[in-house]
Structure formats: C-alpha cells, structure tokens
Image (tube, rainbow, N blue to C red):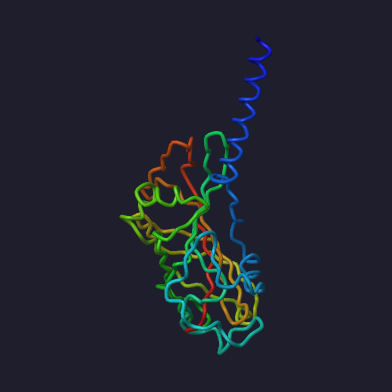
Amino acid sequence: MNRKLLMFGGGGLAVAAIAAFAAWFFFIRSDAPEAVSLEGALETLRTPTAAGQAGAGSTPAAGATAQPGSGGGSSAAGGIDGAWGIAPAGETFVGYRVQEELAQIGAVTAVGRTSDVRGTVTIQDGTVQPGSSFTANLQTLRSDRSQRDNALRRQALETDLFPNATFTLKEAVRLPAGFANGEAFSTTLKGALELHGVTRDVEIPAQAKVENGLIVVVGSIEIKFADYNIAQPRAAIVLSVEDKGVMEFQLFLQKQ
C-alpha cells in the first residue's frame, strides 16, 4: 500500500512538474531581448529583413512616412546641420527592463517596448540644440505577456492616466568633427524626463553614429520608481518586483 501511494505520489509530482514547465514555456517564459547597444542598433540596418520591425510586440512609429536618408555609406547627405526626425528604417523604440520574481518560475527580465515615438532633434553649427525632444506613447508598450501590458494601464506606469513619456534636452551637445562622416560618439544627454506625471532632471549616457545617411542613437538610464511616484505592480503570479527599472531607447533619425 505504501509503495502504491509512493508511486502515485511520485507520478503526481511528475505531472505537476510537466504542467509547470508547460505553463512556463507557453505562457510565462521570458525571451527578453538584449539590452540596447550601438552595434545592435546598427545591425538592424545591415539586415534587410529586420528593417522597420521594432522590439517585441511594438507598433509602427508615429508619423514615419518619409523614405530612408539618401547619401549611403556612413555620411550624412547634405551635412549634419538641420532638423532630424524619426526614420522608417531601422527599429526605433523606447522601452523598459524590470526584474521580476514569478511564482514557480523564478527571476525573469520583463521587457516592454513601443516604436510609437515622435520628436525632432535640431543640429546647428554641429551642435545639438537644447529643446530637442522625443515623446513615447506608453499606451502602446508591448512585452511578451499581454497580462503585463494590460496591468500597466492601471498599475505602475498607469498609462490610462499618463499615456506619454517625454525627454527634452536642456544642454547643448557638441558633435565631433568626424561625426557626419561616421565617427561613433559617446556623450551624456542632460535634460528633463517627464514620466508618470512627474518631471525630473536626468543625465542619460548615450551613443550615436551616422550610418546610411541616418543618425542612430541609443541610451539607457536607471529609473527609481519612487522618484516618479510609480507604485510597484501587483499580481497573483508576481512574488516581487524590483523598486527600479531601466528605461532604454533606440532611435533612427532622418534629416527632414
């Protein structure tokens, strides 16, 4: 009798393990995309099948109707000065990365992104001008789980109440002489970030490079939820969520 019970119990544990694995694989498993990098961004321009596709579940960029920059190679056609907006080529997005602990699953990296980004950079005399800004529509953030996306409408980011996030440059950025000809450039973007109804001064480490007539810009910054009055999200399956996350962006800009 005891042996039968043991065998039955062992079989039950095996079934439970298989069920848990199936739930993880089909519904919860997180294939988080890699963090932003300049090389990763440039690769999307070098892979024709990837052009125009943003991160997981993201939506087409707002107002992206113009054609990719001409001039080819690594130079900016007509020089670097002028107004630059979102290009349809490449994979523009703004998103988040947050560490979660899920019941029976363990630690996962939650990543959500949207390519619904609009804005303009103005360059004059080789200098990015203050007032250049970009706005992301957070209501179109998409991750690998629709449950998480729907929860953000009323929790944490509360996108029903605060649909947009905007970064506005406050200090000019001087570009190196070789930037227009494809020289990669690292800098710190000093400006104001408006998120969840709160505006704070931030400094965002970023990299940029001209490729195929486009300006490619990537960057990321740690965001402490408390700084923006963001409450940690709650759900039955979520055991814990870190009190901070990473805001990351990847922009492909085209001369207007």
Q: Residue at x 48, y 35 (%)?
A: 239
Q: Quadrant of the N terminus?
A: top right
| Place of residue 254 in the rendered image (x, y in percent of width and height, measured from the top left) | 52, 80
In the figure, residue 175 lies in which quadrant? bottom right
Q: Is residue 158 left or right of residue 175?
A: left
How many numbered tags mark residues here? Answer: 0
| Place of residue 220 in the rendered image (x, y in percent of width and height, measured from the top left) | 53, 58
Q: Is residue 230 above or below residue 42?
A: above
| Place of residue 144 in the rendered image (x, y in percent of width and height, measured from the top left) | 52, 52
Q: Residue at x 56, y 40 (%)?
A: 23
Q: Is residue 85 above or below residue 194?
A: below
In the figure, residue 107 lies in which quadrant? top right
Q: Is residue 190 left or right of residue 24?
A: left
| Place of residue 29 in the rendered image (x, y in percent of width and height, measured from the top left) | 58, 45
Q: Residue furthest bottom?
A: 78
Q: Nearer the viewer, residue 179 or 76?
A: 76
Q: Is residue 223 above or below residue 72?
A: above
Q: Residue at x 52, y 76 (%)?
A: 88
Q: Residue at x 47, y 72 (%)?
A: 172
Q: Residue furthest top?
A: 1
Q: Is residue 120 left or right of residue 182?
A: left
Q: Residue furthest left?
A: 161
Q: Nearer the viewer, residue 21 or 129?
A: 21
